[in-house]
Amino acid sequence: RQKYSFHARVTGAAMTTALVVLVLACATFTGLQWGVSVQQTRNDLTTLAEVSAANAADDLDAGRPIQSKAALAALVRAPAILEGRMTDASGATLATYRKSDSALPPVVRVTVPVLGKTGKLGELSLAARQPLLTDLLPKFLALTGALLFAGLGAALFLARRLAGAVIEPVQRLSDAMVQVAASGQFKPVGHQNEDPLFRSLTNSFNHLLGKL
């Protein structure tokens, strides 16, 4: 079984922690961006529905429901629109549009009122394809790869520096043991670290030297 130095294990622990944090951060970022994309689709669809409802309002206000269907028919030229439905004030359907007879994929659906001079004349409901997470993956995987590369590089640099600082007191004690073994002189090791654990180790080593 391969054995790793204490320095390598500290560096590896820091790198593993950094990798987990970066992966979670990138996954969270991708999820948030997907949510933003869905909301942007909803906002765009709402704007389109409001414009179409305003175009139909004059005809409905004038009692020309047949002509109001032209506003819905114009949506055929909008490739993102999968389904549309216009109703009058009583809820009766005036016009419908469906791009395909097959089952709809996940959609974003909005409903806006058709407002005329006399008040609410009906409603217009539109549905558009919801952005899928898989649609965004190519772009965000490239961004995630760049972030991981940069983040792991920085983590490796910092981990090596921090690992050196962590093991420095232990290394000093190790060097002192080597010197005692080589010279036969039992000189106490000075305190150069305020950490209670390393001070305790140093005190124990000096106490052992005193006994010897």
Image (cartoon, rainbow, N blue to C red):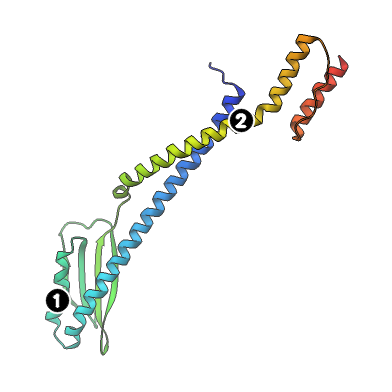
Which residue is under mark 2?
163
Neighbor class of circle 2 (other Cα within 10 Å; few <14, some 14-19, many 20+) is some
State whether residue 118 is above or below residue 113: below
- Measure the alpha-carbon separation of dots 1 and 2: 72 Å
From the image, which quarter does the C terminus lie in?
A: top right
Percent coordinates x, y for residue 49 in the rendering: 25, 72
Amino acid bearing label 2: Ala
Which residue is under mark 1?
69
Percent coordinates x, y for residue 28 in the rendering: 44, 49
Numbered disc 2: secondary structure: helix
Outermost residue toward the bottom in this view: 118
Percent coordinates x, y for residue 167 in the rendering: 66, 27
Amino acid bearing label 1: Lys
Residue sitting nearer the eye, 90 or 58: 58
Quadrant assignment, res 138:
top left
Outermost residue toward the left in this view: 66
Q: Are marks 1 and 2 in contact (CB under 8 Å)?
A: no
Numbered disc 1: secondary structure: helix
Q: Is residue 125 left or right of residue 211?
A: left
Q: Is residue 122 left or right of residue 207?
A: left
Q: Is residue 26 visible?
A: yes
Seen at 42% across and 50% down, the residue is: 29
Which tag, 1 or 2, sits closer to the chain's start? Answer: 1
Percent coordinates x, y for residue 153 in the rendering: 48, 35
Residue sitting nearer the eye, 187 or 65: 187
Residue sitting nearer the eye, 34 or 107: 34
Outermost residue toward the right in this view: 211
Neighbor class of circle 1 (other Cα within 10 Å; few <14, some 14-19, many 20+) is many
